Image (cartoon, coloured by chain):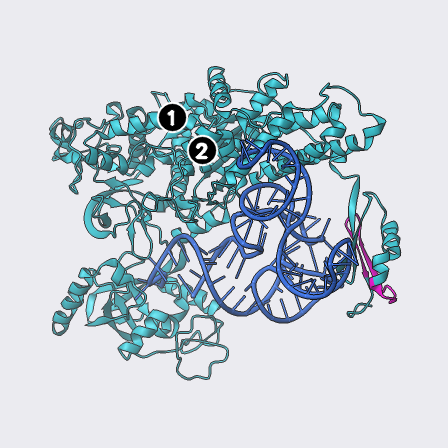
Chain colours: A cyan, B blue
Amino acid sequence: MVDRYDATSIEAKWQARWESDRLHHAPDFDPRPKWYFLTMYPYPSGDLHIGHWYAMAPSDSGARFRRMQGYNVMFPIGFDAFGLPAENAAIQNRIHPHTWTMENIARMRGQLRSMGAMWDWDREVVTCDPAYYKWNQWFFLRMYERGLAYRALSPVDWCPKDNTSLAREQVVGDDRVCERCGTPVVKKNLEQWFLRITAYADELLDFSGIEWPERVRTLQENWIGRSDGVEFELPVADHPEASFRVFTTRPDTAYGMTFAVLAPEHPLVDPLTAPARRAEVDAYKFKAARESDIERLSTEKERDGVFIGAYAVNPMSGERVPIFIADYVLLTYGTGAIQGVPAHDARDFGFAKKYRLPIRVVVAPSNWDGGALSQAYLGEGTMVNSSPFDGLPSREGWTRIADEMERRGVGRRKVNYRLHDWLISRQRYWGTPIPIIYCRDCGTVPVPDADLPVELPMDAEFLPTGESPLRRHEGFRRVRCPNCGGDAERETDTMDTFIDSSWYQYRYLSPQDPDRPFDPRPGAYWLPVDQYTGGVEHAVLHLMYTRFWTKVTRDLGLVPFGEPMLRLFNQGVILGEDGEKMSKSRGNVVNPDDYVSGMGADTVRTYLMFIGPWEGGGPWNSRGIEGAQRFLNRVWSIALDSPGSEIGEKGTASNGHEVRELRHWTHRTIKKVTDDMAGFHFNTAISAMMEFVNYLHRARDATAGTEAWHEAVRTLVLLLAPIAPHVTEELWQRRGESYSVHQQRWPAYDEGLARAETITLVLQVDGKVRDRIQVSADLSETESRDLALRNEKVRKFMNGRPAADVVVVPGRLVNVVTGRRGAG
RNA sequence: GCCGGGGUGGCGGAACUGGUCUACGCGGCGGCCUCAAAAGCCGCUGGGCCGCAAGGCCCUUGUGGGUUCGAGUCCCACCCCCGGCACCA
């Protein structure tokens, strides 16, 4: 009796064999239908973490399943090799980021190979390679030409620990901290490069044609934050030249405006402030400027502000209203100014209360008695105090007032987005240099394509000072202007590393291509990505940027589609044994190598997929993994130790029933596992195989040696192959089948056989289960009903009452209703 | 506050378009094997009550209602947990 198999030697052997046979290379042109299966590439942090396994092993199984189903599957891998950790490690350990990164990549390649995944290493991409980032620069220049990349002075979020600016998407949480290091960010005014992602805001809101999780779609929708409204102009009384615009989503409430508010930084504040109000206004501005964003944005804080001593004119009513400044109005959203309508806006209501400003109802709630409101009314209602619009439903008032503003030329319909342009400048060393040269005479000059890539100098001093390290590298910085040949300076900031990952899926098509970012010929076959998998933490980062990038790529004429990935799946997060997020400081980090070396990669893979739904993640359990190992050992012994294992013996009369049942089990397991694998329900696929194995154990004595037994075991090995690729390959070979199990066709099932011959019929009386009987699966409705009514237990619980109704669900249950509870 | 996702045994989790709640695994208990242990194998394992036992009865999917012959699943109200967004005008 073989109880265990030797995972270590089996796994090493097959990994080497697959590699030398190039079993995992996906040819670019192939008669099979293609399937581009992509998993988010790892950052080369140094060691393969169990989280990498959880992201990658199941996706490998999904890719293997597709391949067995007859697809030509491309399953590439690479490294997201630029980024801050390399630089930080470099500073700490006095090692060059390039060295650190490449050493990590070398180690991780080995660890990745130990997983036994079907990656096509020929397509490997490493983003810190100049041959890769050259194309970041090339894309950047194309965007620059189209006005999609621009430089602007703007208040940006700055991480004081990482010493760099950040994109808005990289500032997270209530306390506005750096996504990388958790340090609260501060505002800085800097000249920075931006990509005009807002130009695609509406298109990014359109998810038609792609199957992405609701969760990600909602996150992106909220992030983009479209709001439809009207922007209109308010003249300033006694300042004939002055006027300012406000944005509102509630033009229906325009007659309810009793004040106006400018952001403290609004450019009109100074010119409009009355001399008598100057001191107070300046004091408020000073205070607002000093406050951090966190304090300023706190919803707990009472709203305050200062009257500037000027009045605006409501263009609809002609009424004069006082102008305030208040820090609850943000310069960065809309026009940086608002109409104050306290009756219909909660913030304005609080403000009006504090400064005793009039609160005028213009949209009456249905039950309104004409009295004062105790809080702002935000709903719809009937227009009042808004002649000539009184009496209209407010919904109609919205349209009519918007129309009227447009007719009079004082306002127009406007869409605003919360989304801002993507800030890509980073004042760090380890990234793609931005290919721009500043010339005293010619101004901003793009680096000519012929001079790409602008290479990162290897001899830079990369200490973070808040200034790009490249700035202090004279050899890099000082350059001749490509236009006039005069003295010029390079841009010394580098690009956000999210640019690298915005298009890496295309580089996998031709990773060595020296002439273009990717070769369109294999692209026509492989693109777009059919299935993408990765963590949801990138919902408004990578997953939004890559959609944007693809739309730009389309507009450059490089691809004929606008969405990079047709299907997206977000796996969950694997937690420590204590149920908490794994972290070194908590000491609950699980090292996959410890388990791989002892139990084998197949066991780790099986366990990770069995632990629960892939999207759910969950705590690691070092006892639980033993269950996965027991299962594989049971498969091993079933597949190799069948008593009387002369294959080909027919079923005999004495075991005819058992053989039929065995075939039924085989086919229903194929059906179940096929359906589950297609939907990434690995946990239930594995449990179905466990049940099958348990059954085979019981059925072995009666059926071993029959053709059906042979089919059953062969099927089991095939079904398990995507999950546990090594042990199944070994079993396949030992059973005398031809190499490789992974090139076999996925087993097909017979519907008829998958259906059970006999089923358990549940007998209920008044909805309560009273008996269960074994009956033929095709028992008719009438027969089921008669059987139920004659049943001893059913009769007992009917207790002499007549059956008022009998509900029969064929093949499932019979419910005898005695009419005690209102039926009949 | 708004948006999204969830609450099922001691634990991870199953449950098709409403039809046997708790599959599969972990843990636990008992047994076989063994000098012993490990491994393996077999059996039991939601809660309560009655019974010496065989067995029987009742309850149970966060809480409370509702629809239905029948609800973990559908509807209403509420509680709690996770994730995201948040003076966005």
Name the residue at 24% across, 33% down.
Answer: A430
Helix or strand or loop: what does disc 1 sit on?
A: helix
Does the segment drawn in magenta span residue A490? no
- Left or right of A579 in this view: B69: right
Amino acid marked by disc 2: Tyr
Q: Mark 2 or 1, which is nearer the eye?
A: 2
Residue placed most toward the observer, A680 or B14: B14
Q: CA distance from mark 2 to mark 1?
A: 18 Å
- Identify the subunit bearing mark 1: A
Work out which quarter of the rendered image holds the C terminus of chain A and state it: bottom right
Amino acid marked by disc 1: Arg
Q: Which residues are magenta?
A: A797-816
Is residue A231 something one can see in this rendering?
Answer: no
Name the residue at 39% across, 43% down.
Answer: A538
Spot occupied by residue A789 in the image (x, y as percentages of width and height): 87, 57
- Left or right of A303 in this view: A542: right
Name the residue at 71% across, 23% down.
Answer: A643
**Dot 1 crowding, Cα within 10 Å, few <14, some 14–19, many 20+:** some
Vertical relation: A793 (above or below) A462: below
Work out which quarter of the rendered image holds the N terminus of chain A and state it: top right
- Left or right of B81 in this view: A648: right
- The residue indicated by pointer 2 is A595
Which of the labelled discs sits on residue A109, or is there none?
1
Vertical relation: A708 (above or below) A220: above
